[in-house]
Image (cartoon, rainbow, N blue to C red):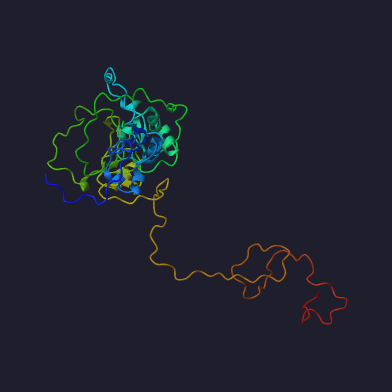
């Protein structure tokens, strides 16, 4: 060992105290892991490097240490001056047979005090004593929200039924209370069986494709079932079907017109006796006694009449049509009215006025009175220009 040539420190240590510091005079400080308050000498030297730093870490009483470090008047601690008097005579009893179920866990604030949780992630200090445990743990979520955030609702995380992500903010208002009674049953009970019984066999398959031409006209009285064999089979059928223009004319099924279609008059399943004609005119003359008549030509469709008459016209109004219109209308000139009305009405007015007066009276009846009133003076001259020959 080589001796030092000079003292390590420039200042000589003062005279030591008469006696060492008693245990009761020791100051309290947090443990190195900031888990509890202790009064031992196990702390970093930097905590006592300056009086200001020492004032931040050391306290005169346990209560001051708990309040300064953990914000609570009580906390977990270890008193180096009052260790356990004697060890326990028996070890800690055996643990419980099964761990606490998730539903039995208590609620407590998270480490950051931003929500309530029921997990096992909390400082050991919170369960160091029954008094401290009562400050941090609650039986229900509502009690935790009210105790930590002073609100009946708050952000939470249920470790027994975790959500995808915890909510960042508390809910604005509590959820609505449940209804007092369950939802009533539906008003209409369901049917116990189908309304109509199902068919015993499935329906037949649909036709492969529609026909090229529509049905001409269905019969009024269809047969109840198809016939086993054709009623009147053709003895010697033609090699090709009859063209439309070669079809015969006959009376229609309802007896209202002549037709060259397939709507023959039918009574049940038996065709009525009917005659065929080569033309529409022959059919009209033979059946209705007139020509023309109502007809249905399926080869050449005619436009139907808008309002057909009840009885067909038997002949034209005029024997022959007028070749050209008349030259001018006839103008009738009527006589002017008389100045005074006559005693009796005119039997029949003449078509034209009389050009010259007639020599004979117009009427055979005498005049009912004189034409002029009698004069008071004699006539100065004879009524006639010459005397009447012969004796009067």
Residue 164 screen position, x and y as percent: 29, 38
Q: Residue at x 21, y 47 (%)?
A: 244
Q: Residue reaching furthest top? A: 89
Residue 246 screen position, x and y as percent: 20, 46
Judge whether 255 appears above or below 270 on screen: below
Q: Residue at x 16, y 34 (%)?
A: 234
Question: Quadrant location of residue 273?
Answer: top left
The C terminus lies in which quarter of the figure?
Answer: bottom right
Residue 22 screen position, x and y as percent: 34, 34
Nearest to the observer: residue 158 or residue 251: 158
Q: Residue at x 38, y 26 (%)?
A: 190
Judge whether 86 appears above or below 109 on screen: above
Q: Kindly tell me whether residue 289 is visible in this rendering.
A: no
Judge whether 353 appears above or below 286 on screen: below
The N terminus lies in which quarter of the figure?
Answer: top left
Q: Is residue 183 left or right of residue 87?
A: right
Nearest to the observer: residue 382 or residue 279: 279
Residue 101 screen position, x and y as percent: 30, 25
Q: Is residue 307 left or right of residue 100?
A: right
Q: Is residue 72 left or right of residue 300?
A: right
Nearest to the observer: residue 182 or residue 301: 182
Q: Kindly tell me whether residue 214 is visible in this rendering.
A: yes
Question: Quadrant location of residue 211?
Answer: top left
Nearest to the observer: residue 258 or residue 346: 258
Q: Residue at x 62, y 75 (%)?
A: 355
């Amino acid at each position: 060992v080589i001796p030092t040539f000079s003292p390590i420190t420039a200042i000589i240590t003062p005279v030591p105290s008469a006696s060492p510091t008693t245990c009761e005079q020791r100051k309290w400080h947090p443990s190195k892991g900031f888990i509890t308050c202790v009064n031992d000498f196990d702390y970093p030297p930097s905590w006592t490097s300056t009086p200001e730093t020492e004032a931040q870490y050391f306290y005169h009483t346990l209560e001051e240490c708990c309040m300064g470090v953990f914000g609570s008047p009580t906390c977990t601690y270890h008193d180096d001056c009052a260790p356990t008097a004697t060890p326990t005579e028996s070890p800690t009893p055996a643990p419980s047979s099964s761990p606490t179920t998730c539903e039995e866990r208590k609620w407590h604030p998270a480490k950051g005090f931003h929500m309530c949780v029921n997990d096992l992630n909390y400082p050991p200090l919170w369960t160091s004593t029954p008094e401290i445990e009562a400050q941090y743990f609650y039986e229900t979520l509502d009690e935790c929200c009210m105790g930590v955030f002073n609100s009946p609702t708050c952000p939470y995380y249920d470790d027994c039924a975790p959500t995808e992500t915890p909510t960042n903010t508390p809910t604005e208002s509590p959820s609505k209370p449940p209804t007092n009674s369950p939802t009533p049953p539906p008003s209409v009970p369901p049917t116990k069986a189908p309304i109509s019984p199902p068919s015993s066999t499935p329906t037949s398959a649909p036709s492969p494709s529609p026909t090229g031409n529509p049905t001409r006209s269905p019969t009024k009285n269809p047969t109840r079932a198809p016939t086993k064999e054709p009623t009147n089979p053709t003895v010697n059928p033609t090699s090709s079907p009859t063209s439309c223009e070669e079809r015969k004319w006959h009376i229609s099924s309802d007896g209202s017109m002549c037709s060259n279609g397939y709507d023959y008059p039918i009574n049940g399943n038996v065709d009525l006796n009917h005659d065929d004609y080569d033309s529409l005119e022959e059919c009209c003359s033979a059946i209705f006694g007139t020509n023309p008549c109502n007809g249905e030509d399926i080869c050449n469709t005619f436009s139907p009449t808008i309002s057909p008459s009840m009885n067909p016209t038997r002949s034209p109004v005029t024997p022959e049509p007028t070749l050209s219109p008349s030259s001018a209308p006839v103008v009738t000139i009527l006589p002017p009215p008389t100045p005074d009305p006559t005693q009796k009405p005119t039997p029949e007015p003449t078509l034209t006025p009389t050009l010259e007066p007639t020599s004979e009276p117009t009427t055979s009846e005498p005049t009912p009175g004189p034409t002029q009133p009698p004069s008071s003076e004699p006539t100065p001259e004879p009524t006639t220009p010459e005397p009447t020959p012969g004796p009067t």
